[in-house]
Image (cartoon, rainbow, N blue to C red):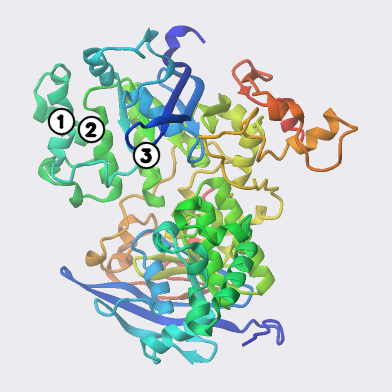
Amino acid sequence: MTTDPTRDGTPVPLLQVDDLAIEFATPDGVVRAVDGLSYSVSAGRTLAIVGESGSGKSVSSLAVMGLLQQPPARIVRGSIRFGGTELLSLGQKAHRAVCGENIAMVFQDALAALNPVHTVGWQLTEALRARHGMSRRDATARAVELLDLVKVPNAKQRVKEYPHQFSGGMRQRVMIAMALSMDPEVLIADEPTTALDVTVQAQIMRLLSEIQAERQMGLILITHDMGVVANVADDVTVMYAGRAVEQASVFDIYAAPAHPYTRALLGSIPRLDQKGGGLAVIPGRPPDPTQVPAGCAFHPRCAFAEDVCRADPPPPTVSLPFDRTSACHFAEEVMNHDEH
Amino acid sequence: MTSTDVVLEVRDLAKFYPVRRGIVLKRHVGEVKAVDGVSLSLRRGKTLGLVGESGSGKSTLAKVLVGIEKPTRGQILVDGEDVSNLGRAERRELRRHIQMVFQDPYTSLNPRMSVGEIVGEAYAIHPDAVPAGGKAKAVRELLDRVGLNPDHIHRYPHQFSGGQRQRIGIARALAVRPKILLCDEPVSALDVSIQGQVINLLEELQDDLGLSYLFIAHDLSIVRHIADEVAVMYLGRLVESGTDAEVYEVPSHPYTRALMSAVPVPDPSLRDQRREIVLEGDMPSPVDPPQGCHFHTRCWLAPLMESRVDPAGSQSRSIPTICRTESPKLGALESPDHLAACHFADDVSAH
């Protein structure tokens, strides 16, 4: 399937998530991990999903991939569409088959995601052999091509090696190569550089951007690093306690955040080019998912909170100019708020 | 800098680990030079940021400083007194002065001990450190000091969040009233919104208690924020050191430059203006480090220098002979405290 994003001027979304809600049954009761999440990603575009641990950013992408263990998880409502196909009505097996051909995922911990007892070449081509019945010789040749593609030096030799013989950065390249083996149209990268050193992180992000531009893939980058987001994303979705609290283009969101959480997050990161006094801090901590505060989930930590925030949940999407949304009672005030 | 200003001084410190082969004979076949000739000084009440990637030797250096590992060579001076070759009892006494805050607050606290036991454990080892008023009172005060509720003294680590656990780790380190805290990546395991809280707590404690910090981190932005002086390590050696402003504004080693440029700046409008130096490859193995300058195999500057040193030489990306054969010494730049170990240090900022 090919999509031409610019034929009629507006990009056709490849992957579209609408009003997704996911619950988990836990000993402490039912936890709503994702609540009303919507986003879309088009060919050649990068969507960054930003959030802290427990915000629901990883759970939602596991749902997209059909990798959620159900139960304990349960998809309460919503839709996940790829091309024209509704994935959630397919049943898990068919869902995974669609993903296998079209959507691939790169996980954070490359060492844990690779099988230590098989060679890297064997793992790289597992999908090709299983799905396309490729012969071993063809598969090995393809594995070498894939490693070349992700710039692993000396690929011919290295397909015969095992994961422990690779450095952290090289392992992450193998993961990316594996994800690319089926020529996906959408790539989901879950914290792909978190465990890596700064200089290696830069190498991997550059590699991802190059491959994306070349193949016009849609890229979903799940991260907590606002620096990485600023460098690569086109659109940003900020998640807090299972909800998308703000969605906007990368330039708008950094220039004038319209949700207090985004604003606080941007204010609390130390910068290389600035030496400041005390670091701005978000008081408290992300809520325990079994005890999400009433009203707006962010209100106990919010500098803008008023009575209405404690009483009523904010509208899920307050529409703002430039196609952006914020889930805040005071979205417009926050956006126009000037600290200086 | 007068000597009384310096609370901790490290001179030519090295830690080598033997590489052995065979089961019975365990032949000595080489060594990993984890730390190889590092000299540093930490000033009283100040923070020295130690920056480097994995494999640079920064954590080994910390282990040697707190006495977990014995140095292969070199001296460690605490308040001017050489403490590198002490006996058991004296080393124990030394540990009162240097305490450590660990990276991972999930694995560095014993899950079977209550918070009171964890924080108070140090008093069992250092009975003379128990303040007047007794152990229980001291522990409660410490918890209060780091922003935890003293009534939670009987709770267990799993009942706390990551940020709170790191506060417990800090309280434990403070129990014996040390002069120096070694903080090994103290916030890298925490959520972004929590990191600032812990950094601010560390800064407050420093102001109130006059503590000196050796702050080890790979996050250059956080080091920029907290450190007064910065030292950069690569493959067991120091490649650059100086005040925070000197190192960050005039980075004078090609590795430091590359490291800084690799840090993403959280501002999309600067996306196209920044020139990023992306280093090729990984850090070489410390078992078999490159000859000459350890960095020459990944250096972006060396090939540019070759044409100048040897104009008749080929136009290919070759490396100047001096980089391949001679290990550069840490030399002073414009200011006597700003040091860089590069044969072409003066040219780094020009490129």
Q: Residue at x 48, y 74 (%)?
A: A126
Q: Chain of mark 2?
A: B
Q: Is residue A63 above or below residue B286?
A: below
**SS for dot 3:** loop
Disc number placed over residue A223 in the picture, else none: none
Amino acid type, label 3: Pro
Q: Is residue B309 above or below residue A209?
A: above
Query: Looking at the image, is mark 2 or mark 1 nearer the viewer?
Result: 1
Q: Which residue is mark 1?
A: B121
Distance (Cα) linking label 2 and label 1? 8 Å
Amino acid type, label 2: Arg
Asked if the residue under mark 1 is in contact with the one under mark 2, i.e. CB atoms within 8 Å, the reply is yes
**Label 1: few (<14), some or many (≥20) within 10 Å?**
some
Quadrant location of the C terminus of chain B in the rendered image: top right
**Label 2: few (<14), some or many (≥20) within 10 Å?**
many
Q: Which residue is mark 3?
A: B186
Q: Chain of mark 3?
A: B
Q: Mark 1 or mark 3, which is nearer the start of the sequence? A: 1
Q: Residue furthest front?
A: B25
- Residue B116 position, x and y percent, is 13, 37
- Residue A40 position, x and y percent, is 52, 78
Asked if the residue under mark 1 is in contact with the one under mark 3, i.e. CB atoms within 8 Å, the reply is no
Residue B263 visible in the snapshot: no
Q: Quadrant of residue A143?
A: bottom right
Residue A97 visible in the snapshot: yes
Amino acid type, label 1: Glu
- Residue B156 position, x and y percent, is 15, 46
**SS for dot 1:** helix
Distance (Cα) linking label 3 and label 1? 21 Å
Q: Which residue is mark 2?
A: B172
